[in-house]
Image: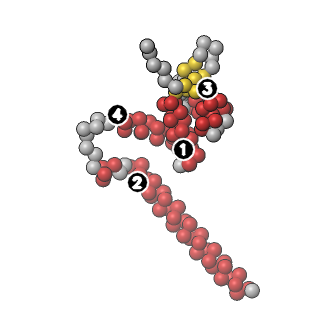
């Protein structure tokens, strides 16, 4: 006897993800995801599909990725999973060009915020003088 994987309809998946159905349909289209369908065209999602949608939700809603960035991150994750387990990776080798660019961007943003704080502090001193 063949075992079937647990499947969800779009409503069940939306409820589990705390999303609207149209968001799932939109992501399905944007991320070129193929889902199983019944003869009548009804979508069915597996536990793997759920995990993928959960990852997309995390990337977009919690980690601030754009759709393009999320697509790239998912591609990187899929590529990393294909690395043979016997291949040793040293922690220092994990730093990539993208990480360096991100660090540089964050440093620039930090410098801008520090300048804004100084300006606000100066304005606060002027306000105190006026009072």
130 is higher (above) or lower (below) than 40: below
Q: Which residue is under mark 3?
A: 9
Identified at 59% across, 72% down, the residue is: 117
Mark 1 and 3 residues: CB-CB less than 8 Å, in contact? no
Q: Position of residue 28 (x, y in %)?
A: 58, 29
Q: Secondary structure at mark 4?
A: loop
Q: Which residue is under mark 2?
A: 100
User: Mark 4 or mark 3: which comes first in sequence?
Assistant: 3
Is disc 2 surrounded by few (<14), some (14 to 19) or many (20+) residues within 10 Å? Answer: few
User: Mark 1 or mark 3: which comes first in sequence?
Assistant: 3
Q: Secondary structure at mark 3?
A: strand
Q: Which residue is under mark 1?
A: 58
Identified at 46% across, 41% down, the residue is: 73
Q: Secondary structure at mark 2?
A: helix
Q: Position of residue 57 (x, y in %)?
A: 56, 41
61 is higher (above) or lower (below) than 33: below
User: Mark 2 or mark 1: which comes first in sequence?
Assistant: 1
Circle 2 or circle 3, nearest the eye: 3
Circle 2 or circle 1, nearest the eye: 1
Identified at 75% across, 86% down, the residue is: 131
Is disc 4 surrounded by few (<14), some (14 to 19) or many (20+) residues within 10 Å? Answer: few
């Amino acid at each position: 006897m063949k075992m079937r994987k647990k499947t969800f309809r779009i409503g069940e998946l939306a409820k589990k993800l705390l999303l609207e159905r149209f968001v799932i349909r939109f992501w399905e289209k944007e991320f070129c995801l193929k889902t199983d369908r019944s003869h009548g065209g009804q979508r069915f999602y597996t536990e793997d599909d759920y995990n993928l949608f959960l990852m997309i939700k995390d990337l977009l809603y919690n980690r601030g990725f754009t759709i393009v960035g999320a697509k790239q991150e998912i591609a990187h994750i899929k590529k990393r999973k294909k690395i043979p387990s016997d291949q040793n990776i040293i922690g220092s080798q994990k730093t990539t060009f993208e990480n360096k660019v991100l660090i540089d961007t964050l440093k620039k943003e930090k410098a801008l915020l520090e300048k804004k704080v100084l300006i606000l502090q100066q304005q606060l001193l002027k306000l105190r003088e006026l009072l």
